[in-house]
Every structure is written in structure tokens, then in C-alpha cells.
Image: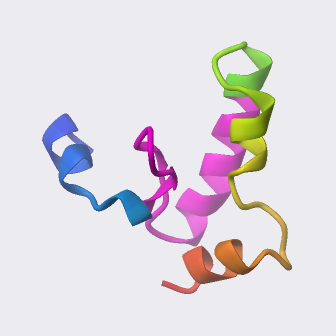
Amino acid sequence: MTTKDRTALPKKDFALPDEQRFPVEDKAHARNAKARAAQSEKAGNLLKSDKAAIPGGHTDAATTAALTR
């Protein structure tokens, strides 16, 4: 995805919409966003509270919505 493509996406298509981080366009991207967030937190590049804001549980309504787009 190019920078131009990324900036053209609506905020709702990101796991962290205010920062436009971790694009989530399908089931695979939703899982990947959660994994990348864990790596970013471990490296000190993401706050624990931001990581917690990324949907990740099977019963989480936002995750269900992201996975069924």
C-alpha cells in the first residue's frame, strides 16, 4: 500500500483511527494489526493503552464488525 493509498482510506478503516495506524480491511489485516501492535508495544513504540484499544477478542463487537466487512 502506498502512502497515497493509505491517506485516502477513511479513519474507520484503521485499528487506531486517530493516528491512522494499523489498517484493517479484512480478517487477515485485523489479526495482523493486533500482532503488530504487540510488537510495537514491546519495542516501546506504542502505549499499552493504545494496544488495548485495538480489537482482538473473539467476543469483541468491533472485532466482529472488522472481520465481517
State the image quarter where residue 37 is shown.
top right
Question: What stretch of residues is rendered in magenta?
Answer: 13-39
Residue at 44 percent of width and 66 percent of height: 25
- Give how far across and how far down residue 51 sits, in percent: 73, 40
User: Which residue occupies the foreground of this view, 56 or 18?
Assistant: 18
Numbered marks: total:
0
Queried whether the magenta region covers residue 41, the answer comes back as no
From this view, report whether residue 11 is shown above or below residue 58: above
Q: Residue furthest top?
A: 44
Relative placement, left or right, of 3 versus 32 is: left
Percent position of residue 14, x then y: 46, 55
Compared to 50, does 57 lie above or below? Answer: below
Residue 8 relative to residue 1: left or right? left
Left or right? Give the position of 48 relative to 11. Answer: right
| Image point (77%, 37%), residue name | 49
Query: Which residue lies at the image location 70% right of the left edge and 48% below the top edge?
Result: 34
Q: Quadrant of the N terminus?
A: top left
Q: Position of residue 56 (x, y in %)?
A: 77, 61
Residue at 71% across, 50% down: 53
